[in-house]
Image (cartoon, rainbow, N blue to C red):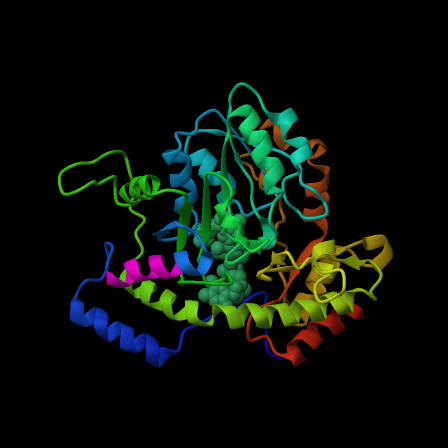
Amino acid sequence: MDKITVTSPLLPDLDEFHELLKDIWDRKWITNNGTLHRQLEQELASYLKVPYISLFTNGTLPLITALQALHITGEVITTPYSFVATTHSIWWNGARPVFVDIDPATGNIDPDKIESAITPQTSAIMPVHVYGKPCDVKRIKEIADRYNLRVIYDAAHAFGVEQDGKSILEWGDLSTLSFHATKVYNTIEGGAMVMHDAEMKQRIDYLKNFGFAGETEVVGPGINSKMDEIRAAYGLLNLRQVDSAIAARRAIAEKYADAIRDIPGISTFPYMAAMGTADEDHSLRHNFAYFPIFVDEAQYGMSRDELYFKMKEHDVLGRRYFYPLISSFSTYRSLPSAHPANLPNATRLADTVICLPIYHDLTDEQVMRVIDLIRK
Ligand code: T4K
């Protein structure tokens, strides 16, 4: 039987890609703010409804650069329920991550728990719109404004997500995206940072190019994180098909939500369960980047890991995103905030989650195979 992986990349048409490659070959300009790089920045800003965007070579370097650009030091409040790159970016800046528990209804940082984690050393909050679900951005802004903190959103999962017709990327001082192969929208490897003004865009463009401002001046210790023309070409073509990919993902999410409603001990987040029903929140334009389910061993009669390995035996390769928690990795586990007693919701979600396969060309038959396995 064919293997069903958790995701599969959205690929551009090969002939169209070849056409763009020929243009690149003719121009002989293959990286460093080329024609297609500039075009992709323009088209993405328009698609995402944001004023300024700067492309990067992956989704980790914009996180690191965002903290650098805002001169973040001391402590940064963040979530343990994410991919390890989120916390690593704080470490790379010599700042100290402070983990705060999550809201079990969304998987996002719980605003009610942020305030008590603030100390005189706190300089920023780095939340994650996990699985693409927007954080409680208004509450986070209120808290940040009250304590004069910066907010950097790791929006790696939130490509195209909108709340009330407005991009979720507009919130916070800066937001970052990942365009990795496993994401809803990909440029193979790639990423971006979204900012509010031209001055910040200029600064970020310097910092991602070693800090160079012109030929002879270096304004800061920048990094090399530029996207090349070949991946920009690939990204331009993928942008044309991302809406239909999201629509296909939605149809699959609705099938999963429908099926698990009748399976005792298997659940998903309420917002996800409501997709396609009368309870759906239509103010949210979601991207269906992931479909997490949670296994209640007592009710389901099998632990999360038993189901996970059973699925694997049958070539259904869901993934336990995000297990283990970032706070439990050796680099971070000795931090006082990393103690599991401080993070009960995150610990429970990490111990019970499986992300089901979801991608644009997963067939009905494959979706049924996944559902049947969980049902049995
Ligand atoms: N912040 C957050 C919240 C993130 O989730 C991430 C990345 C980042 C920051 C950092 O962004 P980047 O620097 O990565 O742009 C994956 C991705 O590597 C990573 O991008 C992603 N988050 C994370 C959640 O997942 P793995 O190790 O699980 O990927 P891998 O290689 O096991 O692939 C998963 C499945 O995808 C495969 O079983 C099959 C399919 N696949 C994968 C690749 C790479 C393909 O079909 N083709 C492919 O080329 O980490």
**Count of all numbered marks drawn on residues in the image:** 0
- Is residue 328 at all visible to an observer of this figure? no
The quadrant of the image that shows the C terminus is: bottom right
Q: Which of 9 and 297 is in front in this view?
A: 9
The residue positioned 24% from the left and 62% from the top of the image is: 35
The residue positioned 86% from the left and 53% from the top of the image is: 298
Image position, residue 327 (x, y; %): 60, 37
Q: Is residue 37 shown in magenta? A: yes
Q: In which quarter of the image is residue 316?
A: bottom right
Please say if 39 is above or below 64.
below
Left of 108 or right of it: where is 259? right
Left of 37 or right of it: where is 305? right
Please say if 119 is above or below 2.
above
Give, as a single range, the part of the protein colored magenta. 35-44
Q: Is residue 367 shown in magenta? A: no
Left of 287 or right of it: where is 24? left
